[in-house]
Image (cartoon, grey):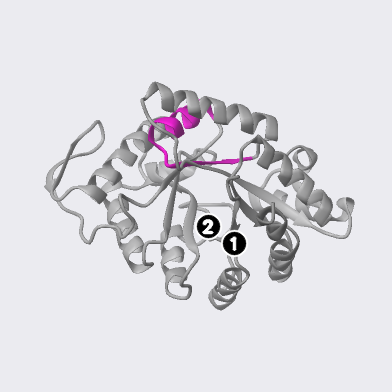
Amino acid sequence: MTQIRFGCFLAPHPPQEQFAIARRVEALGFDSIFTGDHVSFHNPLYESLTLLASYAGITSRVKLGVGVYLLALRHPTIAAKITSTLDVLSGGRLIFGVGVGGENPKEFEACGIPHSERGARVTEGIDVVRRLWRDTPASFKGRFTQFEGVSIDPKPVQKPAPPIWIGGRSDAALQRAGRQGDGWVSYVVQPERYKQSLEKITAAATAAGRSLEGFTRGHLTFITMGKDYESAERVWVEKLSKRYAQDFGPLARKYGIIGTPTQCLEQLGRFAEAGCTYFILDAICDPATEAEQIEMMAAELVPKFRSV
């Protein structure tokens, strides 16, 4: 049976608190630490790759992931340079999650990127990044990026390259995952749709002549654990509604991992049955209780899946 792995998605804190929680995540045995990515957001948010670089200096084992990097907002050549450097400095621990984004059109306006081009830019950008990671010198001729005889050194430590996980729920994202991804990470879906999405990814990979051997099937999920479902649900709705500036009340029972440890295990188990092999857990709670939530996840959830 495929081993299920666990990452921990950390909310932003003042620097020393951020570093303390990251060290604790590693000590508790999680497989990775993840962060999100936006140029502009409703709430303060660190630049993702800069934050991962800071984690690289204070941890030694955990993988360092971005879930997901809005590649269309950056020039892919610069992204290739930064991610290659990050993989070297971390000793080969980068997981490069890539997505389209788009829920905040002002980000694209601020970066001078037409919102309508974001999908095409991500698809091409992935190829640019991989080409520069691999070739010395590299050349590329695409719709948005053209260069000849360019080298990005040092190359990443991971061979043949750091894994690129594709994020998203749309058919375009699933096609991209099947054609280009080393993994896929979903969010805000139910187990039934998760299973259907994996089938679409498999079909896309088959059509492209690709094998999905070693392909990671991930799910980033919002989780609140508590003494009962109702009290945990109230926290989940309050905190996510504030984070995303919209009402999450109608979404709780449909998409949340919420309740007692037993209830959360059952809810995660349905995703495992649907094919998920990598959970990225985002603890939704008061900042002051995030460390406690992470401790609970490590004690009550992670060992149960690893003992199967």
Q: Left or right: where does residue 117 sit relative to residue 287?
A: left
Residue 58 % position (x, y): 47, 76
> Is residue 174 located in the magenta-colored stretch of the structure?
yes
* Nearest to the observer: residue 307 or residue 104: 307
N-terminal label among 2 and 1: 1
* Nearest to the observer: residue 86 or residue 305: 305
Q: How many residues crowd mark 1 within 10 Å: few (<14), some (14–19), many (20+)? A: many
Residue 2 drawn above or below residue 89: above
Going 29% across and 52% down the picture, which residue do you hit? 80
User: Can the viewer see residue 303?
Assistant: yes
SS at mark 2? strand
Span colored in magenta: 170-187
Going 76% across and 44% down the picture, which residue do you hit? 267
**Disc 2 to disc 1, C-alpha distance:** 6 Å
Residue 21 drawn above or below residue 166: below
The amino acid pointed to by label 2 is Thr
Determine contact: label 2, label 1, CB under 8 Å: yes
Residue 248 % position (x, y): 74, 43
Going 42% across and 28% down the picture, which residue do you hit? 205
Residue 42 drawn above or below residue 209: below
Residue 176 drawn above or below residue 64: above
Give the total number of marks visible in the rendering.
2
Location of mark 2 (residue): 35
Q: Which mark is residue 10?
A: 1
Residue 15 % position (x, y): 53, 74
Q: How many residues crowd mark 2 within 10 Å: few (<14), some (14–19), many (20+)? A: many
Image quarter (top left, top right, bottom left or bottom right) of the N terminus: top right
Residue 127 falls in which quadrant of the image?
top left
Residue 199 falls in which quadrant of the image?
top right
